[in-house]
Structure formats: C-alpha cells, structure tokens
Image: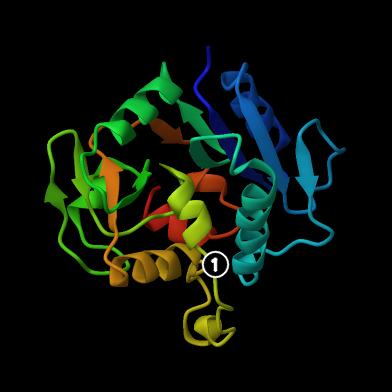
C-alpha cells in the first residue's frame, strides 16, 4: 500500500519536463498547479486564471496551501512540493518519507531537497547549518520539500512588497525567504537532505529566476 502522500507540482510552460516528472510518480496522488501555461489542461491539474510569475508567487502559494488545507489535509499524512523541472532518484518517495520520519524533533516543520552544495553556506535566515546525522538543519526552505500537516496549517504568506525588485531585478520571489524567517522565528526547525534526492534540470532554462538559477543551483 502506498503511503498517504500527496505530491504538489508547480508548473509553467514546460510540458515535456512536467510529463517526465509525472511519469516518475506513477501510482501516487498528484496535484498539478499550473501558472496559466499555453498547453492544454491535464488530469489532476489546477490552472490559475493568470500567470503570477515571481512577483505574485506569494499569492499562488497561498492558494496552493489553502487548497491543500481544504481538500486534502485529512486524507494525507505527508505533503511533497516539487517544481516541474526535476528528475527524481530511485525510490524517491520512500527515501524522502524515511528521512522525514527519522528526524526525532518535535519542532521539525519541513525537509528540503535542495542541492547539498547549497547547505554549505547560510541562506535566508543566515543561520549556520548543523550536521544532524542523516539530515542537515539549515533553518531555510526553498520550495522543494516534504512536510507534515503542521506546515500546511501554519504557513500563510503575507504580500511581498513590489519594491523588492526595484534595485535588483533578478531577486527571487521572496516566498522561500518569508516562510524561512516566519518558521525560524516561531521556533520551528527546518532541515535539508544530506544526499541529493532530486536533480534540478531546469537551472539553465528557469522561467522565473533565470539569472539567479545560473548562479545558485537548486
């Protein structure tokens, strides 16, 4: 029997990559949240009426979390969030769940799948990472992660000030930063895997943050 896990996939105009990811997740419950792409509607797809891009990504993720709360909170124990442009390792779901369950910490809130290389330097909260055995405590999340119901119940995003991009137009959406600060300040612990469970193949063709992804790989 498959674990009670829901995989949320965010997508925009990368149908081949999306199709490849969906194929890798055959047999699991999937919810696709599409930011108003050009291609036709797919099964299990929630299509937004307009493209949010990075400047309104906070609205998009608020909607995604709200839908998770209303429709699926009672039906699933694990919630995974992925972009459409990743390739998963073998037995990805089982590895992610086992690593998450293995964190003996009643204040854990999420486990990210970002590149292990990125954990070598502080990010968002500027907290130095701590090696915790099978995982690394980083105190930041970059929107590619596994969590339980507490995260879904807890996270409600505030509007991101449009002035964020006045000086540096290549800055990211601010969603990961806001969530990281919120959860860290409330005393929760945020972790990252010590092995690369996903390969992010969209760094060179990022649609939301092309300059940022060339510098800082996910």
Q: In this rendering, is residue 38 above or below 92?
A: below
Label 1 crowd bin: few (<14), some (14–19), many (20+), radius 10 Å: some
Q: Residue 179 placed where, x, y %? A: 43, 65
Task: Evaluate whether residue 143 shows in this view.
Answer: no
Name which residue lies at 28% across and 48% down: 191
Q: How many marks?
A: 1
Question: Residue lying furthest top in this view?
Answer: 1
Q: Is residue 86 visible?
A: yes
Residue 61 percent across, percent down from the top left: 61, 59
Residue 83 image position (x, y, % from top left): 56, 43
State which quadrant residue 64 falls in: bottom right
Decide which of 37, 76 is in the foreground and name it: 76
Q: Quadrant of residue 71?
A: top right
Q: Camera-side residue: 88 or 156?
A: 156
State left or right for residue 89 relative to residue 162: left
- The residue under label 1 is 156
Residue displayed at 51% across by 82% down? 164
Q: Is residue 68 above or below residue 50?
A: above
């Amino acid at each position: 029997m498959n674990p009670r896990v829901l995989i949320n996939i965010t997508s925009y105009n990368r149908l081949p990559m999306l199709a490849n990811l969906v194929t890798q997740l055959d047999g699991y419950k999937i919810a696709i949240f599409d930011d108003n792409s050009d291609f036709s509607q797919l099964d299990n797809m929630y299509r937004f009426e307009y493209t949010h891009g990075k400047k309104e990504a906070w609205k998009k993720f608020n909607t995604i979390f709200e839908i998770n709360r209303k429709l699926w909170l009672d039906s699933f124990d694990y919630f995974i969030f992925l972009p459409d442009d990743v390739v998963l390792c073998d037995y990805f779901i089982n590895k992610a769940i086992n690593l998450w369950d293995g964190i003996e910490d009643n204040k854990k809130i999420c486990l990210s799948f970002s590149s292990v290389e990125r954990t070598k330097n502080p990010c968002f909260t500027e907290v130095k990472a701590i090696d915790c055995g099978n995982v690394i405590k980083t105190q930041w999340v970059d929107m590619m992660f596994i969590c339980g119901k507490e995260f879904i119940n807890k996270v409600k995003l505030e509007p991101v000030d449009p002035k964020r991009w006045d000086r540096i137009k290549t800055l990211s959406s601010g969603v990961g930063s806001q969530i990281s600060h919120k959860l860290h300040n409330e005393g929760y612990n945020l972790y990252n895997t010590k092995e690369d469970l996903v390969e992010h193949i969209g760094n060179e063709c990022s649609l939301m943050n092309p300059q940022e992804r060339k510098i800082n790989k996910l």
